[in-house]
Image (tube, rainbow, N blue to C red):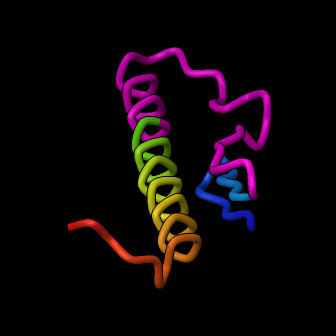
Amino acid sequence: MTGILDKFHVENCIHGARVMARSHQLTPGWIGDDEIDTSIQMLKDDLDACAKEMKRLVNVNRRSLFEGWPTDA
């Protein structure tokens, strides 16, 4: 299963969830501080979204793997 979140791929397989950059160049050439800050903030936001998706996929896998098993809670 693969999902694309802007500049990143989130993949989920039997080995777990992982994030990969879609390209080697993640930002265009910027010369202004505001442009750089905005571009980097967008990448941070995308990575936060990737982390959220990865955690969701891992939880889905964990639930489906152990669904129906008795709990000691």
Q: Is residue 37 above or below residue 50?
A: above
> What residue appears at the point 53 percent right and 58 percent down from the top-left corner?
58
State the quadrant of the N terminus: bottom right
Q: Quadrant of residue 22?
A: top right
| Residue furthest left as drawn | 73
Q: Quadrant of residue 45?
A: top left
Question: Picture coordinates of residue 11 (x, y %)?
Answer: 71, 55
First to last magenta residue range = 14-43
In the image, 11 versus 40, the foreground residue is 11
Residue sitting at 42 percent across and 55 percent down?
52
Going 75% across and 57% down the picture, which residue do you hit? Answer: 14
Occupied quadrant, residue 5:
bottom right
Q: Position of residue 17 (x, y in %)?
A: 63, 50
The relative height of residue 10 versus residue 69 in the rendered view (above or below) is above
Quarter that holds the C terminus:
bottom left
How many labels, in total? 0
Question: Residue 37 location in percent, x, y?
Answer: 38, 25
Left or right: residue 9 compared with residue 23: left
Asked if residue 59 lies left or right of residue 7, the reply is: left
In the rendered image, residue 68 lying in the magenta stretch gets the answer: no
Residue 32 colored in magenta in the image? yes
Residue 21 rendering spot, x and y as whole percentages: 71, 38
Q: Is residue 20 left or right of residue 36?
A: right
Question: 2 or 26, which lies in front?
Answer: 2
